[in-house]
Image: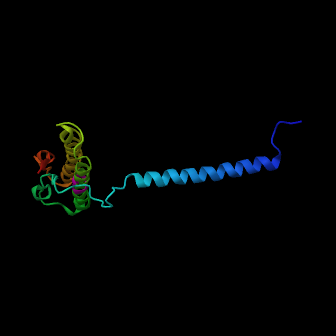
Amino acid sequence: MSRALPKYDRRRVALIGGAAAVLLSGAVIAGSALAGEPSGGTADARTPADPSTITCPDVAPRLPEIPASTQAEVDRNLALLDTQVQEANERLAETVGQGGPNFVRNAILGPLQDKRASAIDRIAIALGRTAERPEGLESLAACTVTE
């Protein structure tokens, strides 16, 4: 006598196992989706006691006249600069009270400055293709936290 399951038992085991896998994966997905929800139901984690925001120098006023051939690329990078500051402000709000005294500088402001420096450099390169490359824009990469 063979130790293998009869054909109909194998199908039943496979069907039950597949259904269990689908149910468990659905529970895991639902649990992970709900894990990030704040208990108050609000999306903004910032409290009135912590009005800190990141402020960065505005790059657009410091740019020379932008040729039409590079306008789209410059606009795209200026929008990226705004997005980077928004993301850093969100991270600042989410990490209130975390880390030591240098946490904000090392985990938020440092990476933000690097990203901004890259975007500003791309703007300068784009402008330098058709006109004289602007100087001194690198100083606009640094940001500060205001209370």
Q: Nearer the viewer, residue 134 or 4?
A: 4
Q: Which residue is drawn at 83% across and 36% down?
A: 3
Characterize the magenta stretch by its predominant secondary structure: helix
Q: Which residue lies furthest to the right in this view?
A: 1
Q: Nearer the viewer, residue 35 or 147?
A: 35
Q: Residue at x 50, y 50 (%)?
A: 28
Q: Residue furthest bottom?
A: 68
- Count up the numbered dots: 0
Judge left or right: residue 78 versus residue 19: left
- Horizontal and vertical percent position of residue 18: 65, 51
Note whether 2 is above or below 17 in the view shown. above
Say whether residue 135 is visible.
no
Q: Residue furthest front?
A: 39
Looking at the image, what colour scheme do you see?
A: rainbow
Judge left or right: residue 6 versus residue 77: right
Judge left or right: residue 45 versus residue 146: right
- Tell me the quarter of the picture where residue 58 sits: bottom left
Say whether residue 35 is visible.
yes
- Horizontal and vertical percent position of residue 21: 61, 49
29 within the magenta span: no
Highlighted magenta segment, given as a residue range: 81-85
Q: Which of 140 and 134 is in front in this view?
A: 140
Q: Nearer the viewer, residue 45 or 125?
A: 45
- Horizontal and vertical percent position of residue 95: 25, 46
Which quadrant would the N terminus be assigned to in this image? Answer: top right
- Horizontal and vertical percent position of residue 48: 17, 57
